[in-house]
Image (cartoon, grey):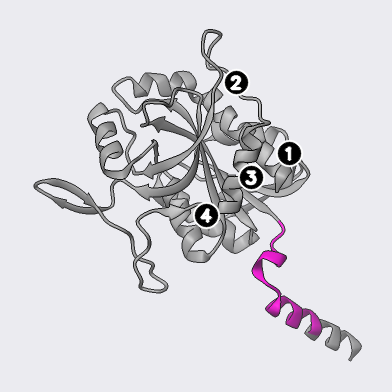
């Protein structure tokens, strides 16, 4: 009888305890192996759990409990894995780390954009005049989502504080030291290699960087009320040279983004 009462008490506490108090881990996602290799190499007490074919690694990184995984490239893959990680691990927050194409003229390879807001560049209405971007709709509430998903303000603040202490790699001996800025990231299922598209993203969406997963992660987190942050390091300028520059700089850019994430963990 006593055990029964203890069990009922546990159930009541669990049911009425806020989600954030129950959350024990920080979820860290990256689309490609290069984007999470540095983080995984420095984790301790690693355990692997397979869910529907995806490998999730739990462990300790910079003194924090984390769950780390590779989503695969593209919006659907990112959304699927984000949903799984939230359902199975109930993280207190989600951080996406990786690389992106630079849109802002002030950004160079190796620089980092802390995404304070994210949107899609390929969601909307296509007419003879081109694509007019629209907001998505929340299938749970049936209400329209915001056009831009805002990252958690506390996480952005922590990222800015961490940016003053992190050491970033230069892209080459002749390159200047990379810098970190806050900006707008746009997402679509296209690897952009077009200076025309770059100008359009900058003009219509005030974009600073473009990639293929961030807004999908942001939308899932927004709809499920989980704090999130997207960190992107610039590997290319999303222009006609993007394919070559991506291959040349993706590893260093990935490690720079991961280095900032590690520093952020110290402050959470």
Which numbered disc flags the more N-terminal residue, 2 or 3? 3
Q: Secondary structure at mark 2?
A: loop
Which numbered disc flags the more N-terminal residue, 3 or 1? 1
Q: Secondary structure at mark 3?
A: helix
User: In the rendered image, which residue does mark 3 sit on?
Assistant: 158
- Residue 31 x/y as whole percent: 50, 40
User: In the rendered image, which residue does mark 1 sit on?
Assistant: 43
Report the residue that reaches farthest toward the top. Answer: 174
Disc nearest the viewer among 3 and 1: 3
Is residue 55 shown to the viewer in this render?
A: no
- Residue 173 x/y as whole percent: 56, 8
Residue situated in front as seen by the camera: 128 or 163: 163
Disc nearest the viewer among 2 and 3: 3
Residue occupying the point 37% across, 43% down:
186
User: In the rendered image, which residue does mark 2 sit on?
Assistant: 169
What distance separates the C-alpha of mark 2 from that of mark 3? 21 Å
What distance separates the C-alpha of mark 3 from that of mark 4? 22 Å
Which numbered disc flags the more N-terminal residue, 3 or 4? 4
Report the residue that reaches farthest toward the bottom. Answer: 1
Q: Is residue 218 above or below residue 160?
A: below
**In-image side of 34 versus 161 (left or right):** left
Disc 3 packing (10 Å; few <14; some 14–19; many ≥20): some
Which numbered disc flags the more N-terminal residue, 2 or 4? 4
Residue occupying the point 64% across, 45% down:
158
Boundaries of the magenta span: 9-24
**In-image side of 134 versus 68 (left or right):** left
């Amino acid at each position: 009888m006593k055990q029964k009462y203890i069990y009922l008490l546990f159930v009541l506490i669990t049911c009425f305890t806020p989600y954030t108090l129950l959350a024990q881990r920080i979820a860290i996602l990256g689309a490609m192996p290069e984007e999470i290799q540095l983080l995984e190499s420095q984790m301790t007490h690693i355990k692997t759990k397979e869910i529907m074919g995806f490998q999730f690694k739990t462990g300790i990184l910079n003194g924090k409990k984390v769950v780390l995984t590779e989503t695969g490239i593209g919006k659907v893959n990112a959304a699927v894995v984000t949903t799984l990680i939230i359902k199975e691990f109930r993280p207190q927050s989600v951080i996406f780390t990786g690389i992106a194409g630079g849109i802002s003229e002030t950004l160079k390879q190796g620089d980092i954009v802390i995404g304070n807001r994210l949107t899609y560049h390929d969601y909307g209405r296509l007419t003879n005049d081109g694509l007019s971007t629209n907001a998505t709709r929340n299938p749970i509430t049936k209400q329209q989502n915001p056009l831009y998903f805002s990252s958690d303000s506390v996480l952005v603040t922590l990222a800015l504080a961490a940016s003053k202490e992190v050491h970033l790699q230069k892209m080459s001996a002749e390159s200047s030291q990379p810098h970190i800025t806050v900006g707008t990231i746009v997402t679509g299922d296209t690897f952009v290699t077009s200076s025309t598209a770059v100008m359009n993203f900058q003009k219509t969406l005030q974009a600073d960087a473009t990639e293929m997963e961030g807004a999908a992660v942001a939308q899932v987190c927004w709809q499920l009320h989980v704090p999130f942050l997207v960190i992107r390091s610039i590997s290319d300028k999303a222009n006609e040279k993007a394919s070559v520059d991506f291959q040349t700089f993706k590893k260093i850019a990935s490690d720079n983004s991961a280095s900032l994430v590690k520093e952020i963990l110290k402050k959470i």
